[in-house]
Image (cartoon, grey):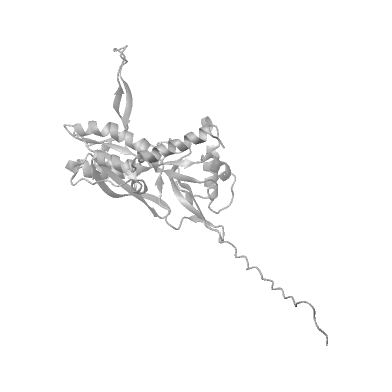
Amino acid sequence: MIGYAGFLRIEIVQSKPPQIPQKRNNQFRFGIGEWYGKSFVQLSPEERRHFASIQLLPKKEKPQQPCPFLSKTGKPVNCWKPGGICSLRSYQKSAETEEITVDPRGSSIRTTCPSRFEEENIIYSWIGEVLLNKKNAVPVGETPFLEKMPDLQNSKQASKKVGRIDNVLVVPQSDPLHWCPVEKQAVYFSGEKMQLEFEVMANVFSKELPFPIKNRRPDYRSSGPKRLLPQLEIKVPTLSTWGKKMAVVVDADFFAQLGFMKEANDISNAELAWFIVHYLEQDGKILLRPKHVFITRLKDAIEGLVAAVPLPKPKFEEAIRMKLQRLTHPA
């Protein structure tokens, strides 16, 4: 009889679970919505290269391009905005196919040039009807509103115009003059300069939509509280004493970024009126259309533009301590 000294050793090898590849996410970036008044999506590769190459030329050599929104029949007006970009919109790059498309979640047009609002005088007919009871009111362009006071040591020095109203809408042949002020506010964008996109696009021959190479976003904080708010605070009180309502033109996305504002119960109790526009795409074109009017008092508009509350004092002081700690005890 044979015996076994020791033990039978059995090893169980556990196999590793199969690695599941992580799902890649689609990319979304803001890029050009309209370029020199034309839908970027509808531009041919040749047109994109042409517009991009223009931006790479020295300033004095750049050919002038007409602005379709400022130009009238027989009176062409050249684009004044560097780069010629009228608006932004969001684009998607598919993780699976790398196909570039307009953002399917919703790719509304974000106005980046105030002249974009000038399309076919639509806003002026609308404002005239609401605030002046006249559709045929005429916009007369930028008009001086503030002037610099003479230096105290030189009281004879002529006053200097230092502030303007974007546009003044006037009823023709009215006596006394029947008018209202108009302020237009587009959105700035933050991120890398567009020159980087131009440099790439100038050499792209593909028929596919180019995906923006850098991240950018509409900067509503800079456009609203930092730019528009001071304009309203300076101009509206004086205009109100004159019995005038300020018309403020913005697009729907801009207005959606504002905080809560109490709406006035009647235009007679309002100091300003927001004229909110949106854009429709039809037959390859992007068309401006009125959306709605929101009337309010200045103090309520300020609350909506600021859309923020101060930090509690202890929280603010804690932030100061942390900064001080980093300065006095660097890592």
**Would you identify the image quadrant in which residue 273 lies?**
top left
19 and 144: which one is in front? 19
274 and 322: which one is in front? 322
Image quarter of the C terminus:
top right
Give how far across and how far down residue 288 sits, in percent.
35, 48
Q: Is residue 122 left or right of residue 200?
A: left
78 and 132: which one is in front? 132
109 and 118: which one is in front? 109
Relative vertical location of residue 104 with respect to residue 49 in this rendering, above or below: below
Task: Identify which residue is drawn at 29% across, 37% down.
Answer: 182
Outermost residue on the bottom side: it is 1
Task: Identify which residue is drawn at 18% across, 45% down.
Answer: 266
Image quarter of the N terminus:
bottom right
**Would you identify the image quadrant in which residue 141 lies?**
top left
Q: Is residue 79 left or right of residue 269?
A: right
Q: Is residue 280 left or right of residue 82?
A: left
Give how far across and how far down residue 117 sits, in percent.
35, 43
Task: Identify which residue is drawn at 24% across, 33% down.
Answer: 237
**Would you identify the image quadrant in which residue 320 lies?**
top left
Give how far across and how far down residue 60 sits, in percent.
52, 30
The answer to whether residue 64 is seen in the rendering is no
Relative vertical location of residue 80 with respect to residue 151 in this rendering, above or below: below
Tally of numbered tags: 0
Q: Is residue 166 left or right of residue 61?
A: left
The answer to whether residue 126 is seen in the rendering is yes
Give how far across and how far down residue 180 sits, in percent.
24, 36
Outermost residue on the right side: it is 1
